[in-house]
Image (cartoon, grey):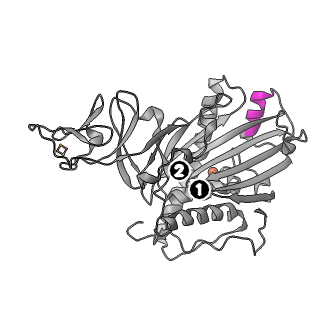
Amino acid sequence: MTLTSPPPAETAPPPTAAAKIFNYPRNAWYVAAWDHEVTGKRPLARTIAGVPLALWRNSEGRAVALADACWHRLAPLSKGKILGDELQCPYHGLRYNATGRCTGMPAQETINPSAVVPSYPVVERYRYVWVWVGDPDLADPTTVPDMYQMDDPAWAGDGETIHADCNYQLVLDNLMDLTHEEFVHSSSIGQEELSEAEFDVTHEGNTVTVTRWMRDITPPPFWLKNMRDKFPGFEGKVDRWQIITFEAPSTIRIDVGVAKAGTGAPEGDRSQGVNGYVMNTITPETDRTCHYFWAFMRNYCLNSQTITTQLRQGVRGVFGEDEDMLRAQQRAIEANPEHEFYSLNIDAGGMWVRQILERMLAAEGRPSSAPALGQGV
Ligand code: FES
Ligand SMILES: [Fe+2]
């Protein structure tokens, strides 16, 4: 279905409930790390959806995710050593293979058959290592969210990770409504036409799309620079677009760009413009923190490392402004546990996201939220 701003009352999603600390699905693929972070040299400790993991590569280069607690006395395996196809506990030397089975014990030849630690399904795709910490029988690699621009030769770019001190859904809210750019990012990508422009929200299955076009506007500094990278000396007005696509549980691709005004970009001809994809995937760490993996991919000037670096630095500055706001928002939520969330028309996309997540959580038999001062979810 399609909604146009403002959404008609009868088709608008129901008001958001008194949700303070939002829960996260477990039966889902989450990015645990960039591919280059997981090596055969030393394990990486990272908590994904509440589960502490030791991530490493075996001798074939395959990424492995084991629970980060030894069967014997629970020493963290992430502090251990990688010995070919085995990970050795740093405390008394028990060794584990990629399936989590113990393959060697100190000073005894018989290995206790119960000596196993959980090994979680892993998929490497789009420059990321994805893990599934829920029911392993449901881990279908075909359901990894689509982020093909990350490693498609028609696209170039790079990104980073933000360890954000907030619940993951606050980042999803932030990305589903970009009118905040006018206020949070006024020196780079913000402009008042953002909140004046009409927008359209559609949803289907586990995706939600928010589309916004701003026609015949003055390009903000970030986009003027990018236009001049492709069209040296460019002056004048542009048509600007933002097409935000959410895919459950927490991946958001934002098709962004500008083109010379009136050259047909809204109708599909983007040849007179520049186009990028802001790739975002947000992995809950705890109920109050998350790993926010982002990248900016572009389809012009593909061979310019200078532009890749400049874009990464530019986006890092912009997202640093979001990070400050999200941290402050999380603190305020925890300081005001009785205060409800209220929703505006601009929140229509985020509210559909929340509905999809509530559906996933209900399927797992778990609540969608817990009180801000509760013991987590
Ligand atoms: S705690 Fe790992 S071998 Fe003892
Ligand atoms: Fe932002």
List x then y, in percent, for residue 61.
40, 29
List x then y, in percent, for residue 169.
54, 59
At horizontal 49% and vertical 53% (from top left) the residue drawn is 28
CB contact under 8 Å: marks 2 and 1:
yes
Ligand 1: quadrant of the figure:
top left
Q: Which residues are magenta?
A: 223-231
Does the numbered disc 2 mark a residue whose Cβ is under 8 Å from ligand 2? no
Q: List the single residue furthest toward the left.
A: 107
Crowding near the residue tagged with mark 2, few <14, some 14–19, many ≥20 C-alpha atoms within 10 Å: many
Please, what secondary structure does the residue beneath circle 1 have? helix
18 displayed left or right of 287: right
At horizontal 66% and vertical 49% (from top left) the residue drawn is 185
Figure quadrant of the N terminus: bottom right
Instruction: Judge whether residue 225 is colored magenta.
Output: yes
According to the picture, the residue beneath numbered tag 2 turns out to be 282
According to the picture, the residue beneath numbered tag 1 turns out to be 172
Please, what secondary structure does the residue beneath circle 2 have? strand
In the image, 170 versus 33, the foreground residue is 33
254 displayed left or right of 31: right
Q: Amino acid at mark 2?
A: Ile
List x then y, in percent, for residue 10.
75, 75
